[in-house]
Image (spheres, coloured by chain):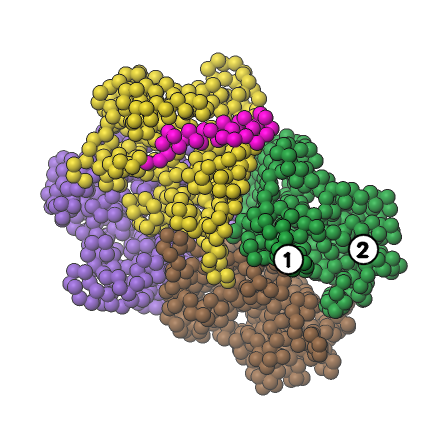
Chain colours: A yellow, B green, C brown, D purple
Amino acid sequence: MAGRKKLNVGMVGYGFMGRTHSNAFGKVNQFFDLGYEPVLKAVCGRDKDKVEDFARIWNYATSEPDWRKLVERSDIDLVDIAAPNDTHTEIALAAAAAGKMVMCEKPLGRNAAESAKMTEAVERAKVPNMVWYNYRRVPAVTLAKQLIDEGRLGRVYHYRAKFLQDWTISKDLPQGGAGLWRLDVGVAGSGVTGDLLAHCIDTALWLNGGIDKVTAMTETFVKERMHNLSGKVEPVGIDDASLLLARFANGSLASFEATRYARGHKALYTFEINGEHASIGWDLHDLHRLQYFDHGDQGIVRGWRSIHITDSDHPYMAHWWVPGLQIGYEHTFVHQVADFLDGLASGKPAAPTFRDALATDRVTDAVLRSAQSGRWEQP
Amino acid sequence: MAGRKKLNVGMVGYGFMGRTHSNAFGKVNQFFDLGYEPVLKAVCGRDKDKVEDFARIWNYATSEPDWRKLVERSDIDLVDIAAPNDTHTEIALAAAAAGKMVMCEKPLGRNAAESAKMTEAVERAKVPNMVWYNYRRVPAVTLAKQLIDEGRLGRVYHYRAKFLQDWTISKDLPQGGAGLWRLDVGVAGSGVTGDLLAHCIDTALWLNGGIDKVTAMTETFVKERMHNLSGKVEPVGIDDASLLLARFANGSLASFEATRYARGHKALYTFEINGEHASIGWDLHDLHRLQYFDHGDQGIVRGWRSIHITDSDHPYMAHWWVPGLQIGYEHTFVHQVADFLDGLASGKPAAPTFRDALATDRVTDAVLRSAQSGRWEQP
Amino acid sequence: MAGRKKLNVGMVGYGFMGRTHSNAFGKVNQFFDLGYEPVLKAVCGRDKDKVEDFARIWNYATSEPDWRKLVERSDIDLVDIAAPNDTHTEIALAAAAAGKMVMCEKPLGRNAAESAKMTEAVERAKVPNMVWYNYRRVPAVTLAKQLIDEGRLGRVYHYRAKFLQDWTISKDLPQGGAGLWRLDVGVAGSGVTGDLLAHCIDTALWLNGGIDKVTAMTETFVKERMHNLSGKVEPVGIDDASLLLARFANGSLASFEATRYARGHKALYTFEINGEHASIGWDLHDLHRLQYFDHGDQGIVRGWRSIHITDSDHPYMAHWWVPGLQIGYEHTFVHQVADFLDGLASGKPAAPTFRDALATDRVTDAVLRSAQSGRWEQP
Amino acid sequence: MAGRKKLNVGMVGYGFMGRTHSNAFGKVNQFFDLGYEPVLKAVCGRDKDKVEDFARIWNYATSEPDWRKLVERSDIDLVDIAAPNDTHTEIALAAAAAGKMVMCEKPLGRNAAESAKMTEAVERAKVPNMVWYNYRRVPAVTLAKQLIDEGRLGRVYHYRAKFLQDWTISKDLPQGGAGLWRLDVGVAGSGVTGDLLAHCIDTALWLNGGIDKVTAMTETFVKERMHNLSGKVEPVGIDDASLLLARFANGSLASFEATRYARGHKALYTFEINGEHASIGWDLHDLHRLQYFDHGDQGIVRGWRSIHITDSDHPYMAHWWVPGLQIGYEHTFVHQVADFLDGLASGKPAAPTFRDALATDRVTDAVLRSAQSGRWEQP
């Protein structure tokens, strides 16, 4: 596209999410024809050698050890926060104050109070903002949204979602530090509730509207783990599993479950929606498929359709290869950048914004409250 | 088997369940070599013509319009109750009082109070008794029990089950009368809680032990329906959907769901158990398969195994055909009769007894209480 | 049904197929309302004790050690041949000569020459006749036929089928005698070609019309096996695997494969048909499902439908249970008896007749010829 | 990696395959730590505007309209041929003569004669060479190779593969020109035989060894199509479907099928191998899974394992994300570049070389000969 504008990106973080975001910024203009072009100006991280390696690999012009400087740099338009959860608020507030656009890895804050501050900050500063709930941009999930918006389901009766992993079952796994900060409640804020359940809630609010109330239970199966930073066995503060029932504003009944103790499942995020006329199902382990049941089909040949989401009329897929050839996990981040850039060009900001992510955090907060109170709680 | 003893059966009911039970009594000795042989002496039902047709088709020696007479007949050893729920208690009490063995279609009573009376009656009379929770005898489910009893799962973290149907979504469906008494709360006692959820609970108690507490929600999506007996539109008293979270005594966390509003699912009863070392999954729509994940498998070739339960070393399967050839729904009833007869011969009564079924009803009662109270309730 | 006519059945054979046929005759009137009622008059087999046991279990009025007497008995209307392949011709010829209806387990003869004699005999005698290609009566397969007859596929381009087993891989498995006569070429006529491939061909001729020519290869992986009757190691005369390419008269291209050396598959009979507008797939390991792809579906929601064949508008299913509850292998034989009896009542003989089965044997003969000649052969 | 060597790449072609190759060259060093680093020096294509756009999007330093100049440029180390089949030979010969390394999109030549010339040329010039049979580098397929090499299958009995598409069914689809040259026999050399079947053969030769003989049939369903270049309806010279039976040198029996007339399948490349001890299955529509059956598993829990190929001990996967998160089609090209570069560094050339691809073309030639002769042909 002629006259494409540059968008200078400063990245904070160089772990797993730093890679997915950097890959997305780097690839987006090879597959999408957009009005903006991200330019990777600087990446910021504490370990000088590692961050320099990262900068070289991912084509960042510079590395920057201090995020406070990054946020102040005049050659940065957008600050992308891909560092651990306990850094989100401070960085986001500073970035917004400096008038930068802000993108933030999910969950937004460690709790809704932090998220509210961040939301207030970006809205006050009127800067474009987005949270990386990337699963909305799995083409199959985007198609689900489209089918729902077209009214194909009719009245919705049921929503159920779960996110099942099994990587923390061993008691010998330590907590804390690089790669394991998600087990450290001080850093993460919560366990699977903020990490996995938050994905399920974000999708659900998007697809099925607001949640009125929840009742929940959580569990920490392994109560103590060696902490990598202190070198001592310390209590585990996070929740290993989180389950809830919910009522949506549209009258539908829901159940959600997130756990890291479901042996046999690595990242099985799955949801199903049952409506009056049709139902939809999806799972992350076969993310390129959508399951669809249309009661309007003739009875004798009615059945769940396994839709291979690789055709050019499927969301985002015209930008990739040819029918039958599947894309994977990382592509969802490319789509998110593409939509964010499109939003900049069109003036219609792409979701989920910080405010959208705050709504999710209010639900996860209510989940944790209910797990304590034993009662139904409102978000 | 030489010297096989006759067991004279009197059946009450000639609907769907009357057929499955009759088929089971008729086939059991063609596939199992047992010490007892059921003899179909009499079937009892209100409609004289229909019950006579039924008797002829299913080879009952006689038909009997009045169950009170049936219960008193000296040529009847066993009374099998396959009539609507509101008849269970009275018939079972009379049968026990007359010293008959009693088999009863599930749920045992319309509520735990009825079930307690029935349990007390058969135990006082010391008569063999059983409740037709037939899904325990799906070979795949029996194998699941065997694998669990062998200790393959280790500590159990999660249990989840659901029973999804979609046959009552239409508002035009009436309630009450033949074929639709399950929608009439006076007859059925409850809706999906007693009808579908009870199956899930029975299996769960069997596979995973006792439940300590539950929190639940229920819903009646269609509030009024024409009643077939009164001819008038009347309030619907049953629950259309029932969801709960539960804690098992073994520390595992569970979620259950039963509904008749899950578009696209006809009878999708499914459960999954996640243990420290292995996980197991099953569903009724492909009842001849068991899903099994063994973490002990070598990493590079570790995956969920889809076990086609048709080999002669799989439970019950040596009695049927050859490997690869599947059996269906009705066979579970044949297995249940076979085990009951085996229990008579061995003196070790086959489960689930009335007392086992009472435990299930105490859970379903707690579910309905919790749906009212909004709190955790104990069975 | 009032005025139902008795049909006196004489069964020859009491092995695996004797059981499936007997079960079918015994159950058919409990599930179908027909003009004829089979009466099990006599079962014939060489081992007196075993055949008497069999008669008792399956409710045959008498047992009869000599099939020649059975065929002559005036109280027999129908002779059903469920004995090994090398007995089919002689018994069928005698039964036809005696004016009996004849049903015969497949394959009809050990080769097309035998089948032709048998066909000629029943046609000359003008007696109703049928061959037990039972897989036509799997409800999903019958539905496939219905969909094809409705013209939903348009021009057919491809047909592919295979029947995979793995039970003879061990070199230690002997050949010959009870249970293993299928490995003895003198008794069986051929190996998988007559046993498994014949099923695939029967279905294909029914669904897709006549075959013009084939090119094939066969293999005997284990060349010598202990023979149970001689007690000596003897050459193996059967084919262990049989593969072919074929041209149908309708212009479609096909491939077929049958083997007992496909590790991991017990009885995986599967076929798929690709037409201009739609495609259909099915397999015996999940026999209660039909896979259906309709190109007429809207693009974004187009996908293979997994149809759970348990609704009352699916073929045969109104006679069984309720939606969602699957039937199994043995039911296909019940359906076949039901259709045969219906054919007697209506005067429109049910297929496949001896003549239909002869067409199949002509194809399998051509397969074996081509495997020798290395050339395309015509049936 | 310090001291990484630059490898200057000149690309010929900017269509679908130009994109997949360019993407691979661009990403490889972000995910793999290698001794060589590709530098995209120039891309060559006939349409000046398009090739310049392509160069800009994919970060080529220059565009070059004449491939003869590209081949001669001293700043080019490697010529990658991603142009239509009829250009492969001439370009490869020139590149080899100029002492360039050569990579070539498959099939190598339009027939084995062309492939032989190309193979001779690169071998005479002693330049590293590779053909883009990318499916070898699907991690699941690479794992299959590893399992076979470990001897897990034992003696192999059966190999079957098919590649099913449906995109040319419409008679209104023209032939020839951009995007449709695969339908023009002069450009493509053959139809599905060279396009789809060649993939199946390449994998098969790699996994299962050499093929001794084949018997085949082909068909052109649509005999005439408008030609985009001439503007006239012209005969169609390609094969629309190609089926064969084969004997491998290891004694196993095989069937192969490739077609563009299998309604419902977009790019369903699937293979299965049955060995004495284990079997393996895979398909491109769920490329991140491997199906594995191990007869050594305990009988009651033996079943096909669905292995989700996303763990760090699975081939290539340590370079990507975390367990449970799948990769897609394009990654196979990245792997191929990584292996090629690794081969340069280690001096052990990565397969498939031109010579390997020539072996495939000899098989596909034999297929086309057999389809004419009606006899078994040797490659």
Quarter of the image for the N terminus of chain C: give it: bottom right
Report the front residue among D240 and C222: D240
Q: Which mark is residue C171?
A: none
The secondary element bearing badge 2 is classed as strand
Give, as a three-letter code, the residue at label 2.
Val
Q: Is residue C324 left or right of residue D172?
A: right
Q: Judge depth for marks 2 and 1 and give the one in front.
A: 1
Distance from Cα at disc 2 to Cα at disc 1: 36 Å
Q: Is residue B4 visible?
A: no
- When asked about the image quadrant of residue D95, the answer is top left
Q: Secondary structure at mark 1?
A: loop
Label 1 resides on the chain identified as B
- Is A357 colored magenta in this rendering? yes
Which disc number belongs to residue B79?
A: 2
Q: Residue at x 37, y 68 (%)?
A: C155
Question: Can you say which quadrant of the picture contains the C terminus of chain C?
Answer: bottom left
Q: Position of residue A120 (x, y in %)?
A: 37, 24
Please tell me whether residue D107 belongs to the stretch shown in magenta: no
Query: What percent of the width, then of the height, locates residue A259?
Result: 52, 32
